[in-house]
Image (cartoon, grey):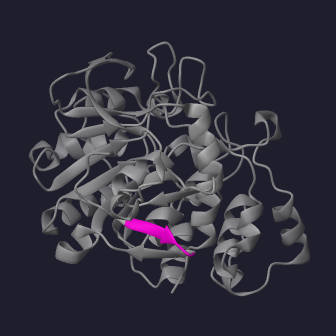
Amino acid sequence: MRNIFVSIFLMTGILVSCSVADQENGKVPVIVITDLYAPAQDPDDNFDILIPFAVENIDLKAVVFDVTGDFRKPGPRNDVRRDPGFIPVTQLNYLFDTDVPCGCAPFTELTSEDDAKMDASAFETKGIDLLFDVLEQSDRPVHIVSTGSCRPLAVAYNRNPRLMISSKVAKVHVVAGASSPDFIEWNIALDTLAAARVLKSDMNMAIYPCATEDGPFDAGINNAYWGLRTLDFITEMEEELRNYCAYSFLSKTDIDYLNYLDVPLSDEDSETLNSYWRDEAAACRHHIWTVATWQQVAGLKLVTCPDGSAEFKSVSEIHADDVVFDEGLEYVSLDVKDNGVFSFEYSDQPTNVQIYYRSDPAENERLLNMALPELYRNFKTN
């Protein structure tokens, strides 16, 4: 990645902050927009948000909940009652001794590309106000990571385009779409007008497609999907973080959700967690789409060490005999349709849009299956 934020490295099981940004200006400020629910709709959202809480050189400023109203109550698109992810964020604030604020974005789809949702309630726009407050008050450019629909970004842009394209924003990282216009990916389909608005905008963006023309569980050069082959390492995580994962993966609804983190897991929950597979039909993989994004934000390189193991390392900690996996962001020009589907062409000149690439998707998955469990095993709470 071409990123001025050199970040953290993994050595002897300890995450150490050593970036130039840390030394001069502090941690990398980040806002996360996530379709995080409780109980989880997709446990990978609850799993992934551990990264900005736990990685030491990321300063998580706010969490904005991307909520789709149809997924809150039982119906054609949903099987249980769900609410925005206040519980997992509260659990993580509790464990990491932080006070990361959170709030919702509008629950309903845009009615036009320029819809600013001015009729939405204060509760449904708290997250947008929070995003603006963080940007306006920050003395350093803020990275915005969007892992759900494009609706919160579109509403923010429609309400305050000047701020969203200002120097207050380091980059908007959009985890959505497909690397081929022949497939309409989930996050795009959630709000097609919002996707079109964001992708047509002049915001400084990096796009991490979630699918190829063959769907969301296919690995290609320009999409970020990969499959984690085992979750056994969760049992080796710090006990409270293991309990957090169990609460999410097992769709717990215990009202004492903080106490749940503090006490040993029941024998029943331990047994269920030890045998947990998110989806056996998908070759026993836990589906992940966002790690590449966090690598770019935190400045982490995926490295093969001389002994054949794989780690995440900062640029400053890479040794001469390490092999750095070839991945990053490339400038592109976009052709965006009104339904949010896009095609792209690589550009020889800088543009406002970059797209993720990786040289070898199969090798990428193999290395990540070593590096990510090690990263999670060594997360430490306060």
User: Does residue 299 appear anywhere in the picture?
Assistant: yes
Where residue 254 appears, as percent x and y from the top left, is 72, 73
Which image quarter: residue 31?
A: bottom left
Q: Is residue 141 magenta?
A: no
Q: Quick one: 32 or 310, which is closer to the camera?
A: 310
- The x and y percentages for residue 311 are 54, 58
- Magenta stretch prevailing secondary structure: strand
Q: Does 169 sit left or right of 17 as displayed? A: left
Left or right, 76 with reference to 119:
right
Q: Is residue 57 above or below residue 281?
A: below
Left or right position of 336 against 320: left
* Nearer to us in this view, 350 or 169: 350
Whether residue 295 is situated above or below residue 284 in the rendered picture: below
**Which span is picked out in magenta?**
8-12
Residue 151: x %, y % from top left: 36, 40
Instruction: Name which residue lies at 53% across and 28% down.
Output: 211
Q: Residue at x 52, y 18 (%)?
A: 183
Q: Residue furthest top?
A: 182
Q: Residue at x 26, y 46 (%)?
A: 2
Give the image location of residue 242, x and y in percent.
69, 72
Answer above or below: position of 216 versus 244: above
Q: How many marks?
A: 0
Q: Quadrant of residue 71?
A: top right
Residue 38 visible to the viewer: no
The residue that appears at 53% across and 26% down in the rendered structure is 220
Residue sitting nearer the eye, 135 or 13: 13
Q: Quadrant of residue 260?
A: bottom right
In the visual, does 100 lie left or right of 210?
Answer: left
Please tell me whether residue 198 is drawn above or below residue 126 in the rendered image: above
In which quadrant is the N terminus drawn? top left
